[in-house]
Image (cartoon, rainbow, N blue to C red):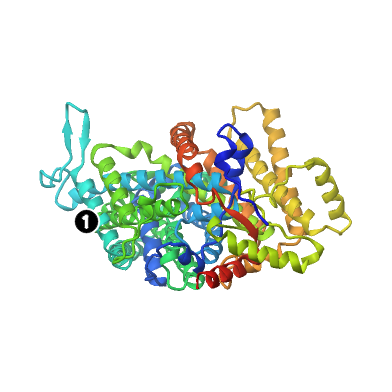
Amino acid sequence: MGVLVDSQKEGFGSSWGGLKSLVRRKQVDSAHSKRLGHHQLAKELTVPHLIAIGVGSTIGAGVYILVGTVAREHAGPALTFSFLIAGIAAALSAFCYAELASRCPSAGSAYHYSYICVGEGVAWLIGWALILEYTIGGSAVARGISPNLALLFGGENSLPFFLARQYIPGLDVVVDPCAAVLVFIVTGLLCVGIKESTLAQAIVTTANVCAMIFVIVAGSYLGYKTGWAGYELPTGYFPFGVDGMLAGSATVFFAYIGFDSVASTAEEVKNPQRDLPLGIAAALSICCGLYMLISVVIVGLVPYYAMDPDTPISSAFASHGMQWAAYIITIGAFTALCSTLMGSMLPQPRILMAMARDGLLPSFFSDVNKRTQVPVKSTLATGIVAAILAFVMDVSQLAGMVSVGTLLAFTMVAISVLILRYVPPDEVPFPSSLQESIDSVTLRYSTRGISGKNPEISTSGDSSQPLLDSKNVAVEKQEALASFIVGTLSEENRRKVAGWTIMLLCVGAFGLTFAASNLWIPRLIRLTCCGVGGLLLLSGLVVLTCIDQDDARHNFGHTGGFTCPFVPLLPIACILINVYLLINLGAATWARVSVWLLIGAVVYMFYGRSHSSLLDAVYVPAAHADEIYRTSVDTLA
């Protein structure tokens, strides 16, 4: 029978106590969570709502600029293939999201999945990075709306005085009242209810899609009449070569960021096992199709070298005598920004709520309004901060920080899929209030003598032991590898081999992409790092392909949903692509993000670590969980 261990009592200076808090994992939220006092969000969303959220969050005004910039500098007429390759790369992450979202349909998205599969420390950093992403992203989008709105009213300075941007000499800032007002409007919509706010986003997204369809249809007609001058070039379809096309796909990949907003609403979906995968897949497919069709049309109307990098679509139509089309295109850009603003502000309150539920943030953020069944307090806090930033600060120079949170989340989701398949948690945490039920079930199994052993309750607060075991690692790895070679790999050794392989895969992906992306590294060192990283990736792929996946994966979380195909190849490819993009974001971006992550580490050490809901948790074998819950209900009855 278990004895509770309070990690707080182990001393703040105890490194092992601190490490145990970083790797403790929580249980998949289920119907049992209602008994533990969690107020559930309203289940109102269906597939059309999820498609509206996904498309609205993904298609921003950037596509109206990207086609010109990428075509001129990277891809040329092959821009369509750049969008296709980027869409396939985004689909790898979408497959991983779809499985985890259907198995773990609770608020929190990548933070929630990381907490279940990897550990509290990594989950905290992912959640903290996502908070930064959605805050900066929402503020940057709001600042970009007012210039487009001004164009609709006749010009750059056509907005009313109380909405127009104003320069304040004493503070040397340009305030944007329109951006702040729009943020407050979106915040109000989100507070009314998830169904109502999603309906509003669907209306705005429909207007944006209609503008894009106009560009496709009218542009196809112009191209048919004029003979597609953009494709009749002596340089051919690949003027920058295949390398240029691939560089263009890395740039336009960020046009697909946003579909993960669908996963953040998992707790509010009526049938998450079916609707979430369908919503994610449909949203990504629609976005990819629209991007490719627009690129086909625009690069055909105007030669790539003659495109306007700032207004490629408007200038393409103007070159054929359709200046009036600029008005429709501006409406499309305006509605795209409004829809993206809604998509940026929707997930953050749910991230805050999930972190507060787990005790890592104050309980203030976990309150759910009983009437609207949305986290109103978290939504208001998010809206106020985003409105202040949008009002007083030009955050465009911080826009690169938005990508860090998303790519970190994509990477951890892919890693979580590998862990779920090969080393799923075989212990689940229970609150100390259920100690009596735990002791009762433990005594029952001890009396039966299951497997000739006493199935003691783990009370170390560390559920990651099956993933990495610290005792005599080198010897055990050799024994496990020998057993693997002769085909007699035991279950215990299989989990150890899989756990170490997943870790070394991540090391290999980082080493390979870092060496390949930094030309300043001496050639010999670069080649060595690339070779070692590639070898780790290839050997990891071979090992995970040869060993069996864990049978417990079939019963992990909510069963009956989507299953990610081509495991382990697909998650490994996803990890490699996202780590490559992360490394290439630039030193300045990483310097800013590092400051934010350092602040997050301090907050966790002084608050989250000591207030975690898993602080006094008792870990029991997953096979006993349902019986313990039943025993606790019978005791209360």
Say what secondary structure mark 1 lies in: helix
Q: Position of residue 106 (x, y in %)?
A: 47, 62
Residue occupying the far left of the picture:
161
Question: Quarter-wise, where is residue 177 in the image?
Answer: top left
Q: Is residue 542 visible?
A: no
Q: Observer-nearest residue: 84 or 21?
A: 21
Residue depicted at 84% across the width and 55% down the height = 484
Q: Position of residue 620 (x, y in %)?
A: 64, 59
For the N terminus, the quadrant is bottom right
Q: Position of residue 149 (x, y in %)?
A: 20, 51
Q: Residues within 10 Å of mark 1 (few under 14, many from 20)?
A: some
Q: Observer-nearest residue: 456 or 158?
A: 456
Question: Quarter-wise, where is residue 287 in the image?
Answer: bottom left
For mark 1, what is the residue?
Answer: 327
Query: Vertically, is 512 above or below 209?
Result: above
Q: Observer-nearest residue: 41 or 338?
A: 41
152 horizontally vs 225: left or right: left
Q: Observer-nearest residue: 26 or 502?
A: 26
Residue occupying the far right of the picture:
486
Residue depicted at 67% across the width and 53% down the height = 458
Q: Position of residue 382 (x, y in %)?
A: 32, 49
Tally the marks.
1
Disc 1 residue type (three-letter): Tyr
Query: Vertically, is 516 above or below 115?
Result: above
